[in-house]
Amino acid sequence: MTDPSVISLFYPFRSEAMEKAALGAIRSGRIASGPSIERFERLLAAEIQRDHVVATSDMTTALTLSLRAVGVRPGQSVAALAFACLSTNAAISMVGAVPQWLDVDPRTVSMCPEYLRRHLTSETAAVVLYHVAGYPADTEAIASVCREKGVPLIEDCDNALGARYLDRPVGQHGAFAVYSFYPNRQINALDGGAVACMDSGAAERLRCLRRFGIHQASFRGKDGEINPASRIDEIGISAGMSEIHATVGCTQFEDLASRLMQTRANADYLSERLCDLRGVRIVCRVPGALPAHWGLLVMAADQARLLSELKTSGIDCSKLHLRNDIYAGFNAKSAYLPGTDSVSAELMALPCGWWLDRAQLDRIVSVVRRAVGA
């Protein structure tokens, strides 16, 4: 049972339709695979306006498969933000590559196109663009740099479903775009991920790779036994979305737009009432960007004090990410990242989700204003 006195930063969507769908899948006996997976892929393709979508077990495997598909090999460099979730950058290590840490623009908390231009090298095999907290980056400028340098771009839209850039859904500029359906994302499929692909050939390759490299149509003969004539030229992994996850996810697309609209309205309300404060700055949007708002991002001069005041008052908030360049396990070279330094010291995510009412929003405003002495 959720504590009603606590204002949650994240809230897993749940409904009777989800419960009914999950129970139906369990009772059907088709738990690992079934028709809902293809239906989920069709619904997502329509939502993000890309024709070819492959559902996976989670976002990290989706990104791992995408890195393999663009040709990243062990020992190569993949450019990515240090300020990101481990679920993103772990995929780089999973293909044997090494992160090349990139900086953010502290005004927008997004990948800096000029920093990218200056630091891409002949050793860079791919760029992973993370849309931080559902705030679209300057994707067109970043994609232009990647085209100029001949480096493939993968968009990490893992908490940006519903975000728009230049009046189109995010995920339009990369060779691949990955999405997450972890419980605290815009669609709660209990878990799961997906890859939006450039064409049907790429999608078919990923469908094989998500099931050990098996071509499903030819893997078994008419007698049901494994067909020795079915070729497996590229060994994949176990990364398919289950029927239960897909059927639960399918129930949520119909009201996704209304939840996103309420979240944006909440973010706008908080922004209007906090924009005059000294010591607190609302993070700027990239021109042409409409965030999905995994949280409302603000920069606080006294981050530690504001975090403490909010949490003591029962308001969940977060620094969002711990920079990944501190982890020795990546075996990556250190880099001068002044934007990341600033963001790490000041960034906070405030609750603004669709589940909050006006009284809760006013409570957030009151605590923030009191904490900064306004």
Image (cartoon, grey):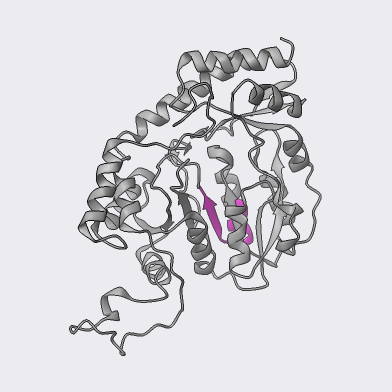
**Percent coordinates x, y for residue 338 in the rendering:** 79, 42
- Identify which residue is drawn at 32% across, 62% down: 32
Against 181, residue 347 (above or below) is: above
Q: Which range of residues does the magenta coloring cover?
A: 144-157
Quarter containing the C terminus: top right
- Is residue 155 on the magenta stretch? yes
Count of all numbered marks drawn on residues in the image: 0
Q: Residue furthest top?
A: 374
- Identify which residue is drawn at 43% across, 69% down: 238
- Identify which residue is drawn at 42% across, 53% down: 192
Q: Is residue 216 left or right of residue 362?
A: left
| Rendered image quadrant of residue 91 | bottom right
**Percent coordinates x, y for residue 313 in the rendering:** 63, 20
Against 62, residue 348 (above or below) is: above
Q: Residue furthest bottom?
A: 228
| Rendered image quadrant of residue 217 | bottom left
**Percent coordinates x, y for residue 94 in the rendering:** 59, 66
